[in-house]
Amino acid sequence: MKKLIIITSLALLLMIPINMVLNNNMEDETIAKGYREKAPKVIYWGSKGSVVKEAQQRLKDWGYYSGTVDGIYGSGTYRATREFQRRHGIGVDGIIGPGTAKKLGISLAESQGASGGVSRDDNVYLLARAIHGEARGEPYVGKVAVAAVILNRVENPSFPNSIAGVIYQPLAFTAVADGQINLTPDNESIKAARDALNGWDPTYGCSYYWNPITATSKWIWSRKKVIEIGKHWFGN
């Protein structure tokens, strides 16, 4: 009987860590799902498809776009969108989100019923996607640091004045160029986004970061390094 009790107790103890892992994974997915459901779809430089084609046609009909209506969001569509936004008093960032889509009279399938504004939850999830795409595998503080750089750019007059504008600025981030921005962020990336939005800046105000091993831009080496976090250097 004593042996049976001991074996049963050991089995229960072994099950606890497994249950904890399963519960944590379920919690992570629940949190991520909540943000996914609230985050509006946007189209930006590099996007392709019928929605882009519809936007191009509207912009062309109204004299903002003179290129080919090919469903590929390139430089011409970007410039036309910015001019359209400027003329209609919308935040000028070259991104077609719910507000711009409403003015254009087109539908963004995943954001039907969304308002023209951007909520904190929208920004948390978008920032988390950028973190996951750019800093996956970095230490937690390194993920917060990447988010802080994005937020510092928002406050810098040399960059777009919105989180979406900074992230989707043409050629600004590798994760946008190679599509990793569209990966589902994990719970740690979401937490890092919230921490950055709440004011934690491990970079001390930096507007740039780069990996010194993989960086190919000669210009980035003209930046003054402030701090190293994980594999990234942060500077201004």
Image (cartoon, grey):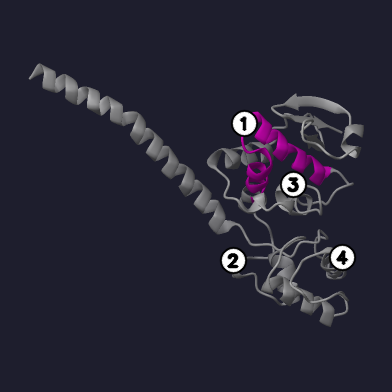
Q: Which residue is mark 1?
A: 140
Q: Position of residue 23 (x, y in %)?
A: 39, 39
Q: Compare residues 200 and 172 and report the one nearer the observer.
A: 172
Could you say which quadrant of the image residue 156 lies in? Answer: top right
Q: CA distance from mark 3 to mark 1?
A: 20 Å
Label 3 vs label 2, nearer the camera? 3
Pick whichever of labels 3 and 2 is earlier in the sequence. 2
Q: Give the magenta part as a residue range.
A: 126-155
Which disc is residue 110 wearing? 2
Give me the residue at 76% from left, 54% from top. 168
Secondary structure at numbered mark 1: helix
Q: Does the magenta-highlighted stretch encompass residue 141?
A: yes
- Residue 72's place in the image compared with 162, above or below, is below
Q: Residues within 10 Å of mark 1 (few under 14, many from 20)?
A: some
Give me the residue at 81% from left, 51% from top. 171
Q: Which residue is mark 4?
A: 79
The total of numbered circles placed on residues is 4
- Identified by mark 4, the residue type is Arg
Secondary structure at numbered mark 3: helix
Q: Position of residue 22 (x, y in %)?
A: 38, 39
Q: CA distance from mark 3 to mark 2?
A: 24 Å
Q: Which residue is mark 3?
A: 174
Residue 161 placement, left or right of 23? right
Q: Are marks 3 and 1 in contact (CB under 8 Å)?
A: no
